[in-house]
Image: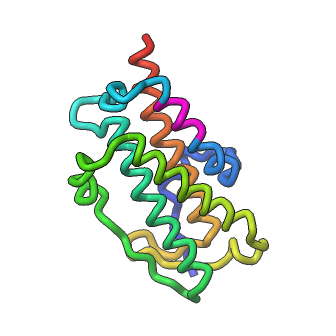
């Protein structure tokens, strides 16, 4: 079996993925506090998501990851369901940055509790993504962490530009 490449591996580098995912909510809360409600409407480039929309995307993704992680642990050879992030983003006007961040943080805490409870064999379980191929449970965690770092970089860039 050939395992899929992790599209977010370049963001992860040598970072421990479990430490990254555990630390992300606090980092996002710090940035949200620095920016304030009006600052979360800023984006890093024209046509790109605002901080609020990035928070919404992260909340959506955490819900998806919660389901995928549990399916991977409970079903052999599970096939995950992909989604179109741009179609989901069409509804982001309905959500505040604080609500999105609250959902993300609560779901992330729940996911981290699950991940930290697992034995090492669980990380070798294999799932299939219809667009990316087969991957291990460990790769899913690495994807979560790399995805976090990608979007943290975006919101940090916005916060840094506003502070300058």
Question: Which residue does the image show at 45% across and 41% down from the upper left?
Answer: 151
Judging depth in this view, the residue of 132 and 156 nearest the camera is: 156
Which segment did they paint magenta? Answer: 26-32
In screen coordinates, is 85 left or right of 14?
left
Q: Which residue ends up furthest to the bottom in the rendered image?
A: 76
Residue 160, compared with residue 41, is above or below; it is above
Q: Which residue ends up furthest to the right in the rendered image?
A: 119
Q: Is residue 64 shown in magenta?
A: no
Residue 15, compared with residue 106, is above or below; it is above
Q: Quadrant of the N terminus?
A: bottom right
In screen coordinates, is 107 left or right of 85?
right
- Residue 3 horizontal/vertical position (percent): 56, 72
Residue 81, compared with residue 6, is above or below; it is below
Q: Main secondary structure of the magenta part?
A: helix
User: Residue 109 is drawn in which quadrant?
Assistant: bottom right
Question: Which residue does the image show at 46% across and 45% down from the upper left?
Answer: 101
- Residue 58 horizontal/vertical position (percent): 43, 51
Question: Which residue does the image show at 46% across and 53% down from the upper left?
Answer: 103
Question: Which residue does the image show at 61% across and 50% down from the upper left?
Answer: 21
């Amino acid at each position: 079996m050939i395992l899929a490449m992790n599209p977010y591996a370049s963001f992860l580098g040598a970072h421990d993925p479990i430490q990254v995912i555990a630390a992300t909510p606090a980092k996002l809360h710090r940035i949200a506090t620095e920016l304030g409600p009006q600052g979360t409407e800023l984006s890093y480039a024209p046509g790109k998501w605002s901080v609020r929309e990035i928070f919404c995307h992260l909340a959506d993704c955490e819900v998806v990851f919660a389901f995928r992680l549990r399916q991977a642990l409970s079903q052999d050879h599970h096939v995950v369901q992909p989604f179109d992030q741009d179609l989901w983003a069409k509804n982001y006007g309905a959500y505040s940055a604080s609500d999105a961040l609250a959902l993300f943080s609560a779901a992330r805490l729940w996911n981290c509790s699950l991940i930290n409870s697992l034995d090492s064999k669980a990380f070798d379980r294999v799932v299939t993504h219809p667009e990316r191929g087969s991957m291990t449970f460990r790769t899913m965690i690495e994807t979560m962490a790399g995805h976090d770092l990608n979007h943290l970089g975006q919101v940090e860039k916005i916060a840094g530009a506003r502070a300058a």
